[in-house]
């Protein structure tokens, strides 16, 4: 069994209005050093695969077909044996 | 076909403008209408498919992302690819983008707020089956109600949409000027609705089905439905 942890973020070319609003809040708290907040999603899933390569293939397929929309999002992932 | 146009209104779990669309088609425009449950695979000889507004699957993951995999969508995609007429309103527009029937995507409103109000739009082209009853300078007053209506497409895709005359509607002010102030959500080029290249699929964020009766404050949405209906009448003459 493997666990994939997927991170989905808006593509860099897209203005992240949610990130901007949070950044504004952080600055109001006095943390002026904080910049460029981007908000994304984290998705975890357990995969019953026979090898890490299989788990990778399944994770990528899930990301490309459903979990991320390539028009607006990029994804990355890590895989752990469990 | 019969003299009436048949509208098939798809119902997803979480659709909430399905009855409005059905009512507008059947009781206001006096056409045929039937609900199509999302698990069905039969479009029941509909001439026009409406993907209505709402919050299909609770907007989980991304708006429209899960509805796109409902069984009926395979049939809707086939229907559209064979030239069938499909209109996606609000959440329906988001589903059309997710399913690849329309280019681009609807991002979170720039204000981050759910925006529910009457706005003004004008046709991007009057040379389409969705806008043929409009004059180039007509301004329609139609409500919007969405949190994710900010149309975005990559530069090249946007250029293609513009060059092909695929913009169906743009947000404007009361006098018809397309301005930043009249853009309620940050959409690129004030885009409120687009068509596919072949002109048989349209998605739009405003709700024409909620603007078909005087009691609702506007009848401007009727012109969009009348354009669609007349496109069938003209075909059969």
Image (spheres, coloured by chain):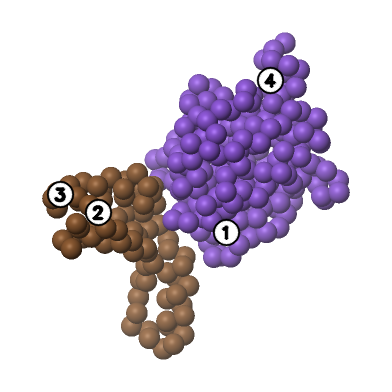
Quick check: do tags 4 and 2 share a chain?
no
Residue B22 in percent (x, y) is at: 72, 38
> How far apart are the alpha carbons under marks 1 and 3?
42 Å
Name the element at disc 3: loop
Is the residue marked by circle 4 packed among few (<14), some (14-19), or many (20+) residues within 10 Å? some
Above or below, B132 against B152 in this view is above
Above or below, B236 against A5 in this view is above
Mark 3 and mark 4 in contact (Cβ < 8 Å)? Answer: no
Q: Which mark is residue A47?
A: 2
Residue B67 in percent (x, y) is at: 50, 45
Above or below, B169 against A51 in this view is above
Residue B82 in percent (x, y) is at: 50, 21
Q: Chain of mark 4?
A: B
Q: Which mark is residue B147?
A: 1
Q: Which mark is residue B232?
A: 4
> How far apart are the alpha carbons under marks 4 and 3?
55 Å
Mark 3 and mark 2 in contact (Cβ < 8 Å)? Answer: no
Residue B220 in view: no
Quick check: do tags 4 and 1 share a chain?
yes
Is the residue marked by circle 1 packed among few (<14), some (14-19), or many (20+) residues within 10 Å? many
Colour that chain A carries in the picture:
brown
Quick check: do tags 1 and 3 share a chain?
no
> How far apart are the alpha carbons under marks 4 and 1?
34 Å
Name the element at disc 2: strand
Q: Which mark is residue A50?
A: 3
Quick check: do tags 4 and 3 share a chain?
no
> How far apart are the alpha carbons under marks 2 and 3?
9 Å
Colour that chain B carries in the picture:
purple
Relative depth, front residue between B150 and B177: B150
């Amino acid at each position: 069994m493997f666990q994939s942890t997927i991170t989905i973020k808006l593509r860099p070319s897209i203005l992240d209005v949610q990130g901007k609003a949070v950044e504004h809040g952080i600055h109001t708290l006095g943390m002026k050093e904080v910049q460029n907040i981007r908000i994304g999603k984290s998705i975890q899933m357990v995969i019953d695969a026979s090898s890490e390569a299989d788990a990778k293939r399944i994770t990528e397929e899930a990301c490309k077909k459903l979990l991320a929309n390539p028009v607006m999002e990029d994804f990355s992932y890590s895989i752990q044996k469990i | 076909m019969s003299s009436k146009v048949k509208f098939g209104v798809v119902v997803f779990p979480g659709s909430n403008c399905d009855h409005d669309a059905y009512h507008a088609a059947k009781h206001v425009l006096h056409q045929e209408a039937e609900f199509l449950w999302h698990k069905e695979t039969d479009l029941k000889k509909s001439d026009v498919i409406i993907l209505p507004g709402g919050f299909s699957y609770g907007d989980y993951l991304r708006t429209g992302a899960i509805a796109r995999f409902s069984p009926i969508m395979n049939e809707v995609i086939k229907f559209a690819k064979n030239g069938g007429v499909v209109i996606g309103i609000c959440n329906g527009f988001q589903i059309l983008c997710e399913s690849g029937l329309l280019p681009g995507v609807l991002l979170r409103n720039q204000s981050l707020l759910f925006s529910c109000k009457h706005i003004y739009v004008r046709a991007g082209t009057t040379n389409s089956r969705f806008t043929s009853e409009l004059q180039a300078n007509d301004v329609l007053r139609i409500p919007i109600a969405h949190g994710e209506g900010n149309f975005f497409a990559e530069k090249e895709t946007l250029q293609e949409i513009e060059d092909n005359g695929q913009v169906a509607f743009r947000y404007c002010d009361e006098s018809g000027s397309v301005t930043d102030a009249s853009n309620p959500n940050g959409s690129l080029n004030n885009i409120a609705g687009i068509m596919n290249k072949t002109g048989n699929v349209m998605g739009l964020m405003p709700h024409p089905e909620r603007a078909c009766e005087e009691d609702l404050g506007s009848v401007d949405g009727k012109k969009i439905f009348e354009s669609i209906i007349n496109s069938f009448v003209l075909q059969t003459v």
